[in-house]
Image: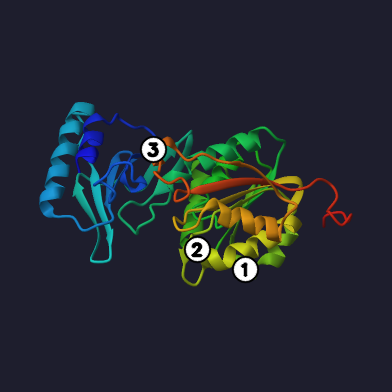
Amino acid sequence: MQALLHAIATMTLPHDAQRIFHGRGGLYPGCEQWALDAFPPVWVLTSFQPVSEDDLATLHHALSARWQQLSPDQPLNWVFQCRHASQTETRLMAGSVPEPHVVSEDGARYRVHVLKGQNHGLFLDMAEGRRWVRAHVQARTRLKVLNLFAYTCAFSVVAMQAGARHVVNVDMSQGAMTLGQQNHQLNGLMAGASFLVHDIFKTWGKITRGGPYDLIIVDPPSYQKGSFVATQDYAKLMRRLPDLLAPHGHALLCLNAPELDVAFLHEQMQALAPELVLQERVANPAVFADVSPERALKVLVYQGPGLSKPDGHLPKP
């Protein structure tokens, strides 16, 4: 636990939501179970193994001591979450959590819920993916964007702020989509985005009619029973991309499954949609460094062909 304690003792006062310590990357032997996140004004400490009350007391002391140095006039707010089958819990350890709880990232604002569920409303490891989308949309003229598995629509907020003409968000969770709409309202984005609460695999007709799209974002869960299993379902998405993309359009494919490597995505893409060309792998935030980059989050950018399909036919309007 020493590396985590050192990270707490040397951390600075964050303004944006961000990860502070990433033991899961394997760079700190003995600390693989730990992650510390800042969702200002709340710290969230997560363990993927059971934790003793003595260890929690040690960590509370460390957080309290550092907080006295960083912001002595403000109360310490922190939440502990354990994600292990034998000890699944979320506990407010000190202070309070604002309601609504709104955090920022690169000028965008998002609602989060750190006391409810394992996912807090904003995936911090995708920060560089959101920055890529912002830069990509800003550099082009009024793109139309399709955001699949939109969750709380953070990609959509960024794309709209960057000047997208329209974003179509699709997700089967009504609760997540409601938060997504609230996120747009928080950022003064009252028009230009649509929200479809549908099972993507049963909504291709509506999705296709809304196209073609200049940018398609695919950020599915790696495994969610009854919704998406990467090894079975990613191929179904890839087959659709050529008909959904506008000429020279781009696709951002995301995969957060440690057991699946970049080759899993790229080899399937070459087999199922070979006209899409790999452009780059988007780097993860530095704090999410991993001893094995193939186990870490994978974000790949592909570009589609120009005006003509390989068989000489024009793409569908």
- The residue pinned by badge 3 equals 287
| Quadrant position of residue 132 | top right
- The residue pinned by badge 1 equals 201
Q: What amino acid type should be assigned to the residue bearing mark 1?
A: Phe
| Number of numbered discs overlaid on the protein picture | 3
Left or right of 169, for residue 123: left
Of pointers 3 and 2, the one earlier in the residue sequence? 2
Between 102 and 121, which is closer to the camera in this rendering?
121
Residue 205 in sight here: yes
Q: What amino acid type should be assigned to the residue bearing mark 2?
A: Gln
Q: x%, y% of residue 195?
A: 59, 57
> Residue sitting at 29 percent across and 49 percent down?
32
* Outermost residue, right side: 312
Nearer to us: label 1 or label 2: 1
Q: What amino acid type should be assigned to the residue bearing mark 3?
A: Val
- The residue pinned by badge 2 equals 174
Badge 3 vs badge 2, beta-carbon distance below 8 Å: no
Of pointers 1 and 2, the one earlier in the residue sequence? 2
